Amino acid sequence: MLGQAVTAVVFYCFIIGFMTMPSKERTLGISEFLLESVAHSLFISWVVVALCYFFNLPNLLYVLILLTLVRLWIYPIRYNLKLDYKVLIWFISLIAAILFLYNGKYTLTFQSWDAVVSWNRWAEELFNNDLHTIGIVYPVFFPGFWSLIYKAMGTADYEIMAKLTLFIIPILLILSHISIYKINKVLGVMCSVFIVFFFFQVLNKPLLNGYMDAPVSAFIFSSLIVLVYYSFMDANDEHSDFVLRTAALIAGIGGIVKQAGMVVVVLFLCYLLYLYLTKQITLKKFGSFGFVVLTPFLLFIIMYSKFSSNYFGNFHVLRNLTESKATEGIYLHSYNQIIEFLGYALFIPLVALSIVNVYFIRNRSGFLGILCLVFSILGFLAYANCCSYDFRNGWWLIVLLAISAMTSVQLLFTKFKLKL
Amino acid sequence: MIISTRYLWMITIILLAASMTLPQLLIDEQKYKELELSEAHKLLPKKLDLLELHNKRKGGYIISEFMPMAYVPEFKNDFLVTYDRYKMFIPVTWYFDWDRCGFDGKRDLRSLDKILECEPNSLIVIKHSSIPDLEKNYPELKFKKIKSNHAYTVFRLKKKI
């Protein structure tokens, strides 16, 4: 049982993605290769979850291993991996930082309320190819992912291995920003600082306790930071399409981690439309990347429509809960929560720097910064109306604001030819 | 240094073979299962010895608003939850033994009297602040305190004579 579980974790987190990775010959860094493998693997794993659910399929681990090996044999992936020691040292030190921060704080099994009674319960339901999510549109990427591990084990009684897959989130956070160091040192440092302080320090526990609020913020951050990386790349760079596709894969998965993840799907589509309208990508690429980012959500909605037709869920319940907590009015209440979390000393510079992007609106990075700012404002309105009964529902707003501010700092550094 | 991925299939086979065999060689499966169980017991409120009480009473439901307890392996067949401040009670888990008291699915809300008719050995694990609700809803029942900690009290139930 243990062997199958570990194999399933390794296979679904890192290897299954090889099935769909392009075999085109190219040279890339090992961190980029790992990021692409993880992004493809999570995406394909979700497709497997959906297929299992639609066709009531049992454990597919061995069939998929066979298919992957056949694919690698017949169409080998012809990449030349550049082993950059600086990047490797950075990667190892960040992994060490995670282990240090989680030492003694990580619980082996699910022990927080929602993680036990909702998220892992849905994983158990999916293990039996059944799903109910109490008739509310709750995206179930991680429950689906855990169900694959349970299926490989043949039982949903043992949770340690399934919960271990949550470590893919800090790994994704690290991998998604490491490549940035190659082109923008300033942006790379800002990302590292944000990841360490916001995700590994402030959201330390919620990132790995089985709640989905911190993971959805992490997926939003990862996909946007890859998108920012793309925006700073040379338009003629042969890797740019691969980077854009990686961002699409992560954003697509982010969209089904929790409802808030849909923000990054819509934001990605808007940016894609901008790239198409400004003739930076072709219609074919617009269509294919749009398809990639929408596929996980479409699969989920088809799954959901099989057991419920209530697409607005418990909005009125959440709204009542919010109103009962926001005695000073929902908008002021939500604003106060953000100030309480960030303090004016962080909030004002973040907003000011985000607004600086307006000056760079003609630049595709500046446009992305503006898009993040606009979506953080729209997100704030949505958050205030439905979910401000608890600030964990709004952590992703900080991510959007931070990405926007980081973009403008990098643009300012470039404009004034400043260096670290 | 440049590494080619041409032979990635070989690395994949080695990686999968290692992940398939090494855990079984390095970790004792029985110990692993025990570890899982002891971790699951962390879901129980502390200092109430609920497992011991449940075992001693040989049957009977555990009734509470603290839903995570439903997922403790020993309670998976025996847990009823309340969503309406101790008025009505229903099973929650996938594994529930529906036949035992003739429960008809997850919408079959039952009152305490009915539950006690079928399982007189049931225990209520209740937050101190919810005790007035229970007493108000069931004035005909007698609550015998068995144990308590800083947050919860365990009651045994009987009909007043």
Image: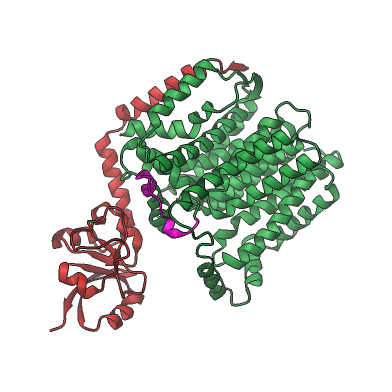
Chain colours: A green, B red
Left or right of A320 on screen, residue A381: right
Query: Considering the image in quadrants, where does the C terminus of chain A appear?
Result: top right
The residue at 31%/32% (across/down) is B27
Vertical position of residue A175 compared to residue A262: above or below: above
**Quarter where residue A153 is shown:** top left
Q: What segment carries the magenta color?
A: A124-137
Where's residue B106, x and y in %?
A: 31, 62
Foreground pick, A246 / A313: A313
The residue at 19%/58% (across/down) is B99
Where's residue B114, x and y in %?
A: 20, 72
Query: Magenta includes A408?
Result: no
Query: Considering the image in quadrants, where does the N terminus of chain A appear?
Result: top left
Where's residue A409, x and y in %?
A: 78, 46
Left or right of B148 on screen, residue B8: right
Left or right of A390 on screen, residue A85: right
Query: Magenta includes A133?
Result: yes
